[in-house]
């Protein structure tokens, strides 16, 4: 089974990759289209040069890699993808042979978390419109990160049942310090999850944002709500 997990940044996406990576029957892949996205857009992201040097920048080549079984022979292959990395013209036909799942998080939490790592945040950076458009195009399941944090075992059982994969309790914890499949950008973005050994508990009240941050939330909220209506 090949599982394509789609999200925006700061959506519990790395913890979910670690969760599936803790299964002995599952290989994981970390944002394989990131370098292609940066090369095509020219955007100045943290560690841009290192990211581009670490991955293929030809989206057709990346799509081919995503179409292949795990080279080490794992029966299941989990791919962590950012929806906004899939620019117009990037191949999507490979997704037809995947179980597609869309991981969401309330935009107020995403904007607050992303803003702690970068000086400015744009609508495109957090990817809600791109994720909504991708869901409309390829379909799939939706799962809310808040539900996973509230009940990791229960919600992962629900997700596994929905995709036809037996639940494995190994998914509930992992060693601190990162995963061998981490992208080179982990040094900038993954500090909190590297310190973790499992899913964090439920989050508190939504952040109270103002100014441009509040604008980002207002623009993203209709896309989030449209996806949340399909959540498991």
Image (cartoon, rainbow, N blue to C red):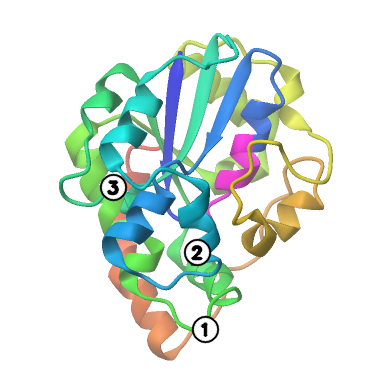
Query: Residue lying furthest bottom in this view?
Result: 211
Task: Report the Cα–Cα distance between label 3 and label 2.
Answer: 20 Å
Q: According to the image, label 2 marks what residue?
A: 49
Q: According to the image, label 3 marks what residue?
A: 86
Please tell me whether mark 3 or mark 2 is closer to you in this view: 2
Residue 203 spot, x, y in % from top left = 66, 58
Residue at position x 37%, y 46% in the image: 228
Residue 111 spot, x, y in % from top left = 48, 71
Label 1 residue SS: loop
Q: Is residue 208 above or below residue 85?
A: below
Q: According to the image, label 1 marks what residue?
A: 119
Indicate which disc, 3 or 2, sits on the residue closer to the N terminus.
Answer: 2
Residue at position x 83%, y 36% in the image: 175
Task: Report the Cα–Cα distance between label 1 and label 2.
Answer: 19 Å
Seen from the viewer's position, the closer of residues 85 and 3 is 85
Magenta span of residues: 11-17
Residue 91: quarter of image: top left
Task: Report the Cα–Cα distance between label 1 and label 3.
Answer: 24 Å
Indicate which disc, 1 or 3, sits on the residue closer to the N terminus.
Answer: 3
Main SS of the magenta part reads helix
Indicate which disc, 1 or 2, sits on the residue closer to the N terminus.
Answer: 2
Residue 165 spot, x, y in % from top left = 53, 12
Label 2 residue SS: helix
Residue 191: quarter of image: bottom right
Pointer 2 local density, CA inside 10 Å: few below 14, some 14–19, many at least 20: few
Seen from the viewer's position, the closer of residues 196 and 31 is 31
Residue 82 spot, x, y in % from top left = 41, 48
Give residue 56's mark: none
């Amino acid at each position: 089974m090949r599982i394509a997990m789609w999200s925006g940044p700061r959506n519990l996406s790395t913890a979910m990759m670690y969760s599936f990576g803790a299964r002995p029957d599952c290989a994981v892949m970390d944002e394989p289209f990131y370098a292609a996205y940066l090369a095509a857009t020219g955007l100045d992201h943290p560690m841009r040069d290192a990211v581009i040097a670490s991955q293929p920048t030809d989206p057709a080549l990346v799509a081919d890699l995503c179409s292949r079984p795990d080279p080490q022979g794992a029966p299941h292959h989990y791919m962590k993808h950012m929806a906004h990395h899939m620019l117009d013209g990037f191949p999507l036909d490979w997704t037809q042979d995947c179980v597609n799942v869309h991981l969401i998080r309330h935009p107020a939490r995403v904007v607050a978390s992303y803003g702690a790592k970068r000086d400015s945040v744009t609508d495109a950076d957090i990817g809600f419109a791109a994720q909504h458009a991708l869901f409309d195009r390829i379909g799939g399941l939706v799962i809310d990160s808040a539900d996973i944090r509230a009940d990791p075992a229960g919600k992962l059982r629900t997700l596994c049942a929905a995709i036809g994969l037996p639940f494995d309790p190994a998914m509930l914890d992992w060693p601190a310090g990162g995963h061998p499949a981490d992208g080179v950008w982990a040094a900038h973005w993954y500090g909190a999850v590297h310190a973790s050994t499992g899913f964090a508990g439920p989050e508190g009240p939504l952040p109270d944002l103002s100014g441009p941050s509040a604008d980002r939330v207002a623009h993203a909220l209709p896309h989030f709500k449209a996806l949340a209506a399909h959540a498991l």
